[in-house]
Image: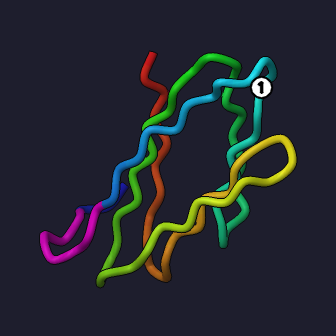
Amino acid sequence: MGNIDPRDQTVRLLVSNLSDDQCTVSIEPLGGQVTLPKGEVFTVQVSGPGKGLVEVSYATNGLVIGEWDGAITVLMNRQ
């Protein structure tokens, strides 16, 4: 992962799976996907230039997290 410019914006989210099944977390626009097992929590960190917005949408069997142009998204398992 490259260095983050201090002028960049960083957004951190906790994503929890409270359902009885695993779910898929998709990162757009690049289309990366990870599985979030039942009962687990991920930290999502989106960093990039400017003052972009992070969009979180519910989809069948999971979530879609949309980053802004030039942003980098990192998912970390909290356990």
Residue 3: percent from left, percent from top = 24, 62
Residue 32 coordinates in the image, percent (x, y): 69, 55
Q: Is residue 72 above or below residue 32?
A: below
Q: Is residue 47 magenta?
A: no
Instruction: Tell me the quarter of the picture where residue 59 sits.
Output: bottom right
Extreme-right residue of the structure: 60
Q: Secondary structure at mark 1?
A: loop
The residue shown at (47%, 57%) is 73
Above or below residue 77? Residue 61 is below
State which quadrant residue 8 falls in: bottom left
Residue at 39 percent across and 79 percent down: it is: 52
Count every numbered label the image shows and give the total. Answer: 1
**Any magenta on residue 5?**
yes
Of residues 72 and 39, the one nearer the viewer is 39
Task: Say left or right for 2 vs 58.
Answer: left
Tag 1: Cα neighbours inside 10 Å, few (<14), some, or many (≥20)?
Answer: some
Prevailing secondary structure class for the magenta stretch in the rendered image? loop
Range shown magenta: 4-10
Q: Which residue is mark 1?
A: 22
Image position of 45 (left or right of 19): left
7 relative position to 18: left or right: left
At x 86% / y 48%, what residue is drawn? 60
Q: Vertically, is 9 above or below 40?
A: below
> Which amino acid, mark 1?
Gln
Residue in the picture at 59% in, 60% down: 56
